[in-house]
Image: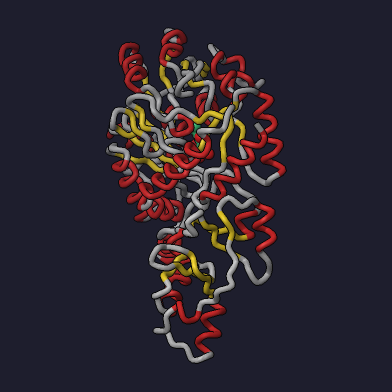
């Protein structure tokens, strides 16, 4: 994106206008052949130059002003704020070689959110198309396209789009016949929707501990928690990290259990070169606004089993017979996604590789900058066979006190950080289902998420890292 703000001094006004049109910032930073900053041209400067006899072919070197404002990348927030005003709304940030590596503007100095959806692809075009077609409920071409393409992306045959990730989980459980008297094993660290979906069915959740390394459900604990009533396991690929699917599938196979993968935080992650979501009987995804790709609200069940796919569609669509209108075969639900949401989903899916790559780059930057910060550790990313993706960049402090201090200072600096999920076993309403929770409680106390949004640049990462550094 920083490239959208740069123009070589030999470019002409026409090219600069095209660049301004792209970056939507009203400005280009002028660089020489060695990429060194040597001027700034605003759309106002161009307007004045044109009125003053310049043409679209005039080169920028002729019209650029030499007195321009910039700051070193290491400059702190207050220094930059003093440079910004009503006339100068955006300034380039340079490295020691005077090359532009980033920029700063008031908007970016203000609040840094934990996550933001990235909607700069075809989302709006497809939504307009869906609305123009008048197919705005749950029939329409985008639904089928999104289901098909997302399932294929995961290496699975069938997709069943749902209203959100929670309904996807419930739909999967109902379809597999899970109900009262059954036990379903879930990890202690997850978003509450995982256990809630089990409780909706009347089955009994069994909460087990996580692995210290991966923070995912521990297969050894699953084995210990098995009972004659165990019917299913819901491994959750937490914070983008794949579970140990080989061990989990073996336990499931040996004990005749269903596996429902909760992939809400791990779109595109891989275990032994296969995408998560392609291991279990059914896998569930969420497309909430803070997930890797979003449809606003939305979810999907994917499966290779044609019969499960058919059943899930039946339950999702009021249990109504496909052959006989208003004849209901089962007590179903209305868990459908709208064509408008699916339109956003199709556009998001077109860019999923790019989105994941950008998230990865951001995490890499955090890793590099945090490597010398004592007392802060990042989530592991080098566990053999597991290729995690970046959902939220997740770290842990060495002591609880450090974590508390980090929250205090981040808050003062208007930076949105989030604590780890509260272990299910620590909540009044769930704790009676606990089987084991030693490691989960230890990790959750120390862990937190750092801002992970596509609009972050090196300076934003440095802002966060500097605060962590100063705090510790
Ligand atoms: C987000 C999330 C869900 C629920 O998804 P919704 O679309 O918000 O209903 C379920 N499980 C996990 C692990 C999640 O992170």
Residue 353 position in % (x across, y down): 36, 47
Identity of the residue drawn at 42% across and 80% down: 59
Judged left or right of residue 110, residue 162 is left
- The answer to which quarter of the image holds residue 71 is bottom right
Q: Nearer the viewer, residue 402 or 202?
A: 402
Q: Nearer the viewer, residue 86 or 58?
A: 58
Residue 255 position in % (x across, y down): 34, 11
Q: Nearer the viewer, residue 133 or 113?
A: 113
* In the rendered image, the vertical position of residue 190 relative to residue 85, given as above or below: above
- The answer to whether residue 135 shows anywhere in this view is no
* In the rendered image, the vertical position of residue 77 relative to residue 308, given as above or below: below
Residue 451 position in % (x across, y down): 56, 43
Q: Nearer the viewer, residue 298 or 43?
A: 43
- The answer to which quarter of the image holds residue 343 is bottom left
Identity of the residue drawn at 27% across and 34% down: 306
Identity of the residue drawn at 52% across and 85% down: 49
Residue 50 position in % (x across, y down): 50, 87
Judged left or right of residue 24, residue 122 is left
Identity of the residue drawn at 41% across and 17% down: 231
In the rendered view of the protein, which quadrant contains the C terminus?
A: top right
- The answer to whether residue 422 shows anywhere in this view is yes
Q: Identify the colour scheme used.
A: secondary structure
Name the outermost residue toward the bottom.
Answer: 53
In the rendered view of the protein, which quadrant contains the N terminus?
A: bottom left
In this rendering, the count of numbered labels is 0
């Amino acid at each position: 994106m920083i490239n959208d703000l740069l123009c070589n001094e030999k470019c002409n006004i026409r090219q600069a206008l095209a660049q301004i049109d792209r970056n939507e910032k009203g400005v280009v930073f002028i660089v020489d052949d060695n990429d060194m900053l040597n001027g700034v041209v605003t759309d106002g400067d161009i307007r004045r130059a044109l009125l003053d006899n310049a043409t679209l072919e005039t080169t920028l070197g002729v019209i650029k002003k030499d007195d321009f404002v910039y700051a070193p990348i290491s400059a702190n927030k207050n220094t930059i704020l003093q440079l910004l005003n009503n006339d100068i709304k955006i300034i380039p940030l340079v490295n020691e070689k005077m090359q532009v590596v980033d920029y700063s503007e008031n908007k970016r100095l203000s609040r840094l959110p934990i996550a933001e959806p990235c909607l700069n692809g075809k989302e709006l075009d497809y939504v307009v198309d869906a609305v123009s077609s008048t197919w705005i409920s749950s029939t329409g071409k985008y639904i089928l396209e999104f289901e098909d393409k997302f399932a294929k992306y995961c290496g699975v045959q069938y997709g069943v789009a749902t209203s959100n990730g929670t309904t996807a989980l419930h739909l999967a459980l109902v379809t597999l016949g899970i109900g009262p008297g059954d036990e379903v094993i879930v990890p202690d660290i997850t978003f509450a929707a995982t256990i809630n979906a089990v409780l909706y069915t009347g089955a009994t959740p069994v909460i087990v501990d996580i692995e210290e390394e991966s923070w995912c459900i521990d297969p050894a604990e699953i084995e210990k928690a098995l009972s004659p009533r165990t019917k299913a396991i819901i491994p959750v690929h937490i914070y983008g990290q794949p579970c140990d699917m080989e061990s989990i599938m073996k336990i499931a196979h040996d004990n005749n259990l269903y596996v429902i993968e909760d992939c809400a935080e791990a779109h595109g992650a891989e275990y032994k070169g296969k995408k998560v979501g392609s291991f279990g009987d059914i896998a569930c995804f969420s497309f909430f606004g803070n997930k890797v790709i979003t449809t606003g609200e939305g979810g999907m069940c994917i499966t290779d089993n044609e019969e499960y796919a058919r059943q899930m569609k039946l339950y999702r669509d009021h249990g109504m017979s496909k052959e006989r209108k208003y004849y209901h075969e089962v007590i179903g639900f209305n868990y459908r996604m709208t064509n408008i949401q699916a339109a956003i989903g199709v556009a998001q899916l077109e860019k999923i590789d790019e989105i994941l790559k950008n998230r990865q780059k951001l995490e890499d930057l955090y890793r590099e900058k945090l490597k010398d910060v004592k007392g802060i550790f990042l989530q592991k990313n080098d566990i053999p066979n597991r290729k995690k993706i970046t959902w939220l960049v997740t770290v842990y402090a060495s002591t609880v006190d450090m974590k508390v201090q980090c929250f205090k200072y981040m808050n003062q600096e208007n930076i949105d950080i989030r604590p780890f999920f509260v272990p299910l076993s620590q909540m009044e309403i769930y704790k009676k289902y606990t089987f084991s929770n030693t490691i989960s409680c230890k990790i959750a106390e120390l862990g937190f998420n750092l801002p992970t949004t596509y609009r972050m640049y090196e300076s934003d990462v440095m802002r966060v890292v500097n605060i962590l550094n100063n705090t510790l």
